[in-house]
Image (tube, rainbow, N blue to C red):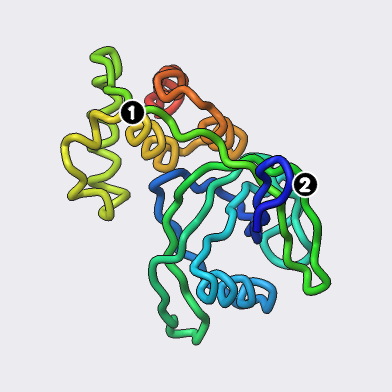
Amino acid sequence: MAGPSNLVELPLFPLSSVLYPGGQLQLRIFEPRYLDLVRECTRNDCGFGVCLILEGHEVGAPAVPAAVGTLARITDFHHGADGLLGISAEGSRRFRVSRTRVRADGQLRGDVEWLPEELAQLVPVEFALLQTILERLIETMAPQWKDAPREAYEDASWLGFRLAELLPLAGDEQQRMLELVDPLHRLAELRDILPRFQKA
């Protein structure tokens, strides 16, 4: 539902990690407010907003979310051995939260505006090392990307978002990578962070 100033209402799902455009998300759902959220998204063929938690926890009282998040669209359902509902979702567009409110059932809702899509940019040669590092990370940590086409590694946005989700960044660093709007700037920051992980 759209409101004034092109704001859109979204159910929000605060998490302790960041979801990036094109990223994969696996969730186990057990709280009634989130079961309702999944039902609503399925019924209306819509997504929900994933935001990094700034204060609070994933369960219990509503958490305080970061202002920039990513739309998640449910792609699959399953039931685990523990009987809980599991969902798979994929990250889509980024948004900025204008205001939030908590429903009586504890579900967090946000009025959001969409951030512009990043323009496709080829990865400059000075970032070739990042492509090699991502290939190695995918081999050991992210089998879901092992069949990614070569062209994906040439896309500055895809390369930056995949590195941001696989490198052991702190929460505030993950959030910064989401909020940056220039994919080449994101790659430059990731390159500058790398030496920290190579000392071990």
- Label 2: which secondary element: strand
Which residue corresponds to the image point at 66% horizontal and 76% vertical from the top-left? 31
92 vs 48, left or right, is: left
> In this rendering, is residue 130 above or below 81?
above
Q: Position of residue 170 (x, y in %)?
A: 56, 36
Residue furthest top as drawn:
126
Give residue 149's quadrant in the image.
top left
Which residue corresponds to the image point at 63% horizontal and 42% vertical from the top-left? 113
Quadrant placement of the N terminus: bottom right
> In this rendering, is residue 176 above or below 128?
below
Label 1, residues with CA under 10 Å away: few <14, some 14-19, many ≥20: few
Say which mark, if any, is on residue 99. Answer: 2
In the foreground, 59 or 72: 72
Label 2, residues with CA under 10 Å away: few <14, some 14-19, many ≥20: few
User: Sequence order check: which comes first, mark 1 or mark 2?
Assistant: 2
Which residue corresponds to the image point at 49% horizontal and 68% vertical from the top-left? 45
> In this rendering, is residue 98 above or below 128?
below
31 vs 80, left or right, is: right
Give residue 183's quadrant in the image.
top left
| Three-letter code for the amino acid on which mark 1 is drawn | Ala
Q: Position of residue 143 (x, y in %)?
A: 26, 54
In the foreground, 15 or 102: 102
In the foreground, 49 or 7: 7
User: Label 1 belongs to which residue?
Assistant: 120
> In this rendering, is residue 51 above or below 1?
above
- Label 1: which secondary element: loop
Q: Position of residue 192 (x, y in %)?
A: 44, 17
Mark 1 to mark 2: distance in Å?
A: 30 Å
| Three-letter code for the amino acid on which mark 2 is drawn | Arg
Which residue corresponds to the image point at 37% horizontal and 39% vertical from the top-left? 162
3 vs 88, left or right, is: right
Q: Position of residue 44 (x, y in %)?
A: 54, 71
